[in-house]
Image (cartoon, helix red, strand yellow):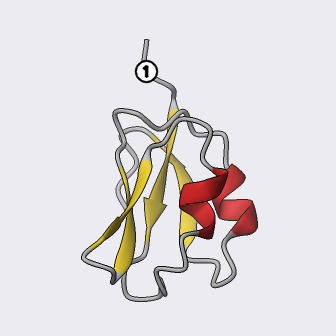
Amino acid sequence: MKSKKYAVVDSSRCVACGTCMLECPKGAISIVKGCYAFCGSETCVGCGRCAKVCPTGCITVIERGEVQ
């Protein structure tokens, strides 16, 4: 069963530091081409740990089906 929430990264604000990727307990976040983080919504459980540690605040946890 999928989580009701998942993380979304604002790639225009992300600095690709990798802090979120190290914090994610499910390995749902990866760094794309060394430029920005991407969260795989199928793997993400919506715990919000990545959003809490992000130094730029570019990660938001949203409800599935919510338009971002």
Q: Position of residue 22 (x, y in %)?
A: 61, 56
Report the quarter where the C terminus lies: bottom left
Residue tagged 1: 2
Compare residues 28 and 47 and report the one nearer the observer: 28
Q: Position of residue 67 (x, y in %)?
A: 35, 56
Q: Is residue 66 above or below residue 60?
A: above
Q: Quadrant of residue 52?
A: bottom right
Report the quarter where the N terminus lies: top left
Residue most extreme to the top: 1
> At label 1, which amino acid type do we have?
Lys
Q: Is residue 36 above or below residue 15?
A: above
Describe the element under mark 1 as helix, strand or loop: loop
Q: Is residue 33 above or below residue 59?
A: below
Residue most extreme to the right: 52
- Lateral position of residue 38 relative to residue 61, left or right: left
Give the residue drawn at x 54%, y 70%: 18
- Lateral position of residue 18 relative to residue 65, left or right: right
Give the residue drawn at x 59%, y 62%: 20
Compare residues 42 and 5 and report the one nearer the observer: 42
Q: Is residue 4 above or below residue 25?
A: above
Give the residue drawn at x 66%, y 53%: 23
Q: How many marks?
A: 1
- Lateral position of residue 30 relative to residue 6, left or right: left
Compare residues 4 and 43 and report the one nearer the observer: 43
Q: Please rate how many residues cluster around mark 1, counting C-alpha atoms within 10 Å: few if below 14, some from 14 to 19, many from 20.
A: few
Give the residue drawn at x 60%, y 47%: 24
- Lateral position of residue 65 relative to residue 63, left or right: left
Q: Position of residue 45 (x, y in %)?
A: 54, 33
